[in-house]
Image (spheres, rainbow, N blue to C red):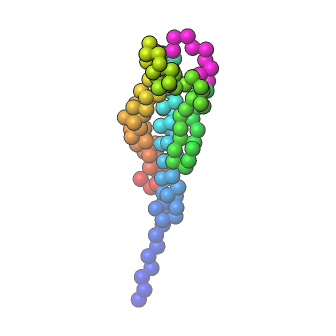
Amino acid sequence: MGVEIRFFGPWFDGRAERAMQDAADTAREDIAEFGEEHALALMGGYFRNPTGYYESQVKTTRVSADVSLVHDDGVIYGPWLEGVGTRNRARPGFPGYRHWRTTKQLVQARGPEIAERAVRRHLPEMGG
């Protein structure tokens, strides 16, 4: 007498693992997109005489498999606009707009919710 056990389905043929990686990638992309859009929205509301150049330099770069970075591509006056440049200390009249710090706080608060939505979209692929 013998017993034969067969395992099949997304958990056993690799589909679930691929779907989990896809969900993580989607979550990372969605969170970065949210951060970029929020930073640009703040800039649009805060900047008094925008030329459009600084905003045009804001982009998202994938720096590793798990990390995307929203940044201003190193625009030289970016730290001054944020309020963390050396000229902000010498001239206390302009404290900066704090658009990146505000965006970071919001992304930290909303990131888990955004990630959860991304995972839910991939649940059917995982067999859930």
Residue at 57 percent across and 29 percent down: it is 72
Side of 128 relative to 49 (left or right): left
Q: Residue at x 57, y 42 (%)?
A: 62
15 or 44, nearer to the observer: 44
Residue 87 lies in the magenta stretch = no
Residue 81: x and y in percent read 51, 21
Among all residues in the image, which is located at the extreme front? 90
Q: Is residue 26 visible?
A: no
Q: Is residue 111 left or right of residue 72?
A: left
57 or 89: nearer the viewer: 89
Q: Position of residue 104 (x, y in %)?
A: 43, 32
Residue, far left: 109
Q: Nearer the viewer, residue 111 or 97?
A: 97
Q: Position of residue 23 (x, y in %)?
A: 49, 47
The residue range painted magenta reads 47-56
Look at the magenta stretch and give its main secondary structure.
Answer: loop
Residue 50 falls inside the magenta stretch:
yes
- Residue at 52% in and 61% down: 14
Q: Quadrant of the N terminus?
A: bottom left
| Vertical arrangement, residue 24 with respect to residue 9, above or below | above
Q: Quadrant of residue 110?
A: top left
